[in-house]
Image (cartoon, helix red, strand yellow):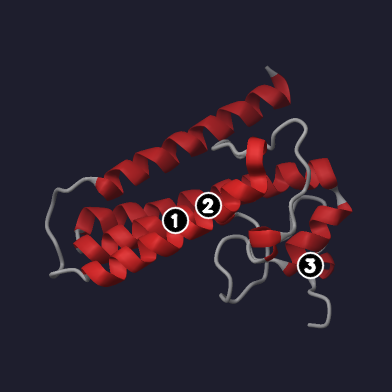
Amino acid sequence: MGQAGRTSRVAAALVAAQFSLIGLCLLPVGPTVGPGARGLGLALLGVAGLVGILAFAALGSDTRVSPVPAQRSTLRTSGIYRVVRHPMYAAVLLACLGVVVSSARVLALVALAALMIVLHLKAGFEDRLLRARYGAPFDDYRARVPAILPGLPFRPAPLPGQRPSQLERPGG
């Protein structure tokens, strides 16, 4: 099958893991750790919905669940993509966090923790594919825009063939 087959298998596994964990997060079963905070949970779901809508609007017909970029897609760096490189992943995490906060279910919390790991891996996989397609423009974009959540300490790991010095932010 070669590289294309391996890429497809990895992408499919990441998507399957992502949706399985989202499903676990939504299951209304298991013990809770308290009463939950319904208002805060709903607010997080609202923010997640807004981020998701902005990402859909920016991607248009290139929207997909696979981390493999669409064949004729272009590198998006404006709109919501000025704030985060993977806004759909941010929307998914915020929505699941809203469910966790609202329900206070242990299973949802465990699923959210695992989902964070899966989406981190999926973002890294997608970044490697984007770098292979777009080269230096993607490296510049990656060096200045966080992957999933803005405002967190940000220092991306080098991609294969990239030196850590190539990741320094302009002016910092």
Q: Which residue is mark 2?
A: 53
Q: Residue at x 51, y 53 (%)?
A: 52
The residue positioned 88% from the left and 54% from the top of the image is 136
* Residue type beneath disc 1: Gly
Residue topped by disc 3: 167
Residue 22 vertical placement versus 151 (above, below): above
Left/right placement of residue 167 relative to residue 116 reads right
Alpha-carbon span between mark 3 and mark 2? 30 Å
Snapshot quadrant of residue 105: bottom left
Q: Secondary structure at mark 1?
A: helix
Query: Does the image show residue 107?
Result: yes
Provide the residue designation for mark 1.
49
Q: Residue furthest right?
A: 136
Height in image: 75 above or below 80?
above
Residue type, mark 2 in image: Ile
Marks 3 and 2: CB-CB under 8 Å? no
- Where does residue 90 sit, x and y in percent of width and height? 51, 58
Determine crowd level at label 1: few under 14, some 14-19, many 20+ residues with C-alpha closer than 10 A.
some
**Amino acid type, mark 3:** Leu
Q: Earlier in the sequence, mark 1 or mark 3?
A: 1
Relative depth, front residue between 166 and 15: 15
Question: Which quadrant is home to the N terminus?
Answer: top right
